Image: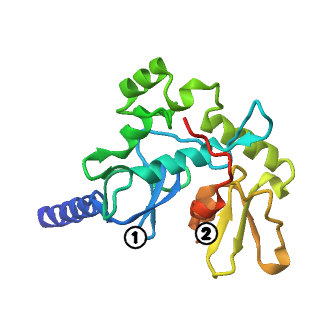
């Protein structure tokens, strides 16, 4: 019995060490708080940045895409070469791993909060609360405007899209021209531009975790998709 317990303990510790191993490699920006490294999406722990499609009205008319502005700032923080991420062994609602990531010596999550380009999430503990207080006091980045928090924005968009989707399952999934299995969330900048075709093999999902478990991925943030009006604090 003792040998069995030791064997099981060694398996558990080994699995824990593997799951907590650093992730290192070149990174691609998915949005203002998410990276993709070696094909794996990683969410920056302790922050919540606006979604790419989030906008605010301009005094001169039109819309300012401040969500894409956040993604641009994160992209500017990535030094050439490898990004190092320390996993927390936790995941967000869409299944992405939560990790503290560094570009050189720069803590990317801390830098986004310090610049006022992201918020600390309402749930859970964030190590960046004091940095957020400073950014709020100095009215840096998004703090200079009355902007909708991303968690309210996602909830509002999903509720609205769910009223038109079958059984309220508002997440769209398809296979793109490159053969990649991708899904669009109701808050995606491409959501309204994509028309579902079930005969083509498109599918509806009720949540991001459900789509991810079925083998679909969210599309990457594309620099070519940036419109002229990008939030520039």
Residue 19: quarter of image:
bottom left
- Of callouts 1 and 2, which one flags the residue occurring earlier in the amino acid sequence? 1
- Point out residue 55 in the picture as x, y percentages from the top left corner: 70, 40
- Point out residue 80 in the picture as x, y percentages from the top left corner: 34, 62
Could you tell me which quadrant the C terminus lies in?
A: top right
Residue drawn at x 74%, y 34% as measured from the top left? 58
**Mark 1 lies on residue:** 38
**Mark 2 lies on residue:** 216
Local crowd size for mark 2, using a 10 Å CA cut-off: few (<14), some (14–19), many (≥20) = some
- Point out residue 224 in the picture as x, y percentages from the top left corner: 62, 63
121 and 91: which one is in front?
121
Local crowd size for mark 1, using a 10 Å CA cut-off: few (<14), some (14–19), many (≥20) = few
Left or right, residue 231 beside residue 80: right
Residue drawn at x 61%, y 44% as measured from the top left? 67
Q: CA distance from mark 1 to mark 2?
A: 16 Å
Left or right, residue 207 beside residue 109: right
15 and 191: which one is in front?
191
Q: Residue furthest right?
A: 164
Q: Residue furthest top?
A: 137
The kind of secondary structure element at disc 1 is loop
Q: Can the viewer see residue 92?
A: no
Q: Residue furthest front?
A: 60
Residue 155: quarter of image:
top right
Residue drawn at x 64%, y 56% as measured from the top left? 226
Left or right, residue 158 beside residue 35: right
Instruction: For marks 1 and 2, give the one nearer the viewer.
Output: 1
Q: Can the viewer see residue 2?
A: yes
């Amino acid at each position: 019995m003792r040998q069995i317990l030791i064997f099981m303990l060694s398996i558990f510790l080994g699995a824990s060490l593997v799951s907590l191993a650093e992730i290192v490699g070149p990174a691609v920006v998915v949005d203002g708080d998410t990276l993709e490294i070696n094909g794996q999406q990683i969410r920056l722990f302790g922050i919540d940045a606006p979604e790419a499609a989030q906008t605010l009205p301009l005094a001169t008319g039109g819309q300012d895409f401040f969500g894409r502005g956040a993604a641009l700032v994160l992209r500017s923080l990535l030094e050439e070469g490898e990004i190092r991420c320390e996993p927390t062994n936790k995941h967000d609602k869409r299944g992405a791993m939560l990790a503290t990531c560094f570009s050189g010596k720069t803590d990317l999550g801390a830098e986004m909060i310090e610049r006022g380009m992201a918020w600390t999430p309402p749930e859970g503990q964030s190590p960046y609360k004091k940095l957020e207080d400073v950014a709020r006091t100095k009215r840096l980045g998004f703090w200079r405007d009355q902007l909708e928090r991303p968690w309210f924005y996602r909830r509002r968009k999903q509720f609205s899209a769910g009223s038109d989707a079958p059984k309220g399952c508002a997440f769209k999934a398809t296979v793109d021209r490159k053969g990649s299995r991708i899904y669009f969330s109701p808050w995606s900048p491409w959501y309204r531009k994509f028309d579902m075709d079930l005969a083509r093999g498109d599918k509806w999902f009720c949540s991001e975790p459900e789509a991810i478990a079925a083998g679909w991925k969210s599309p990457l943030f594309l620099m070519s998709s940036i419109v002229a009006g990008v939030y520039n604090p």
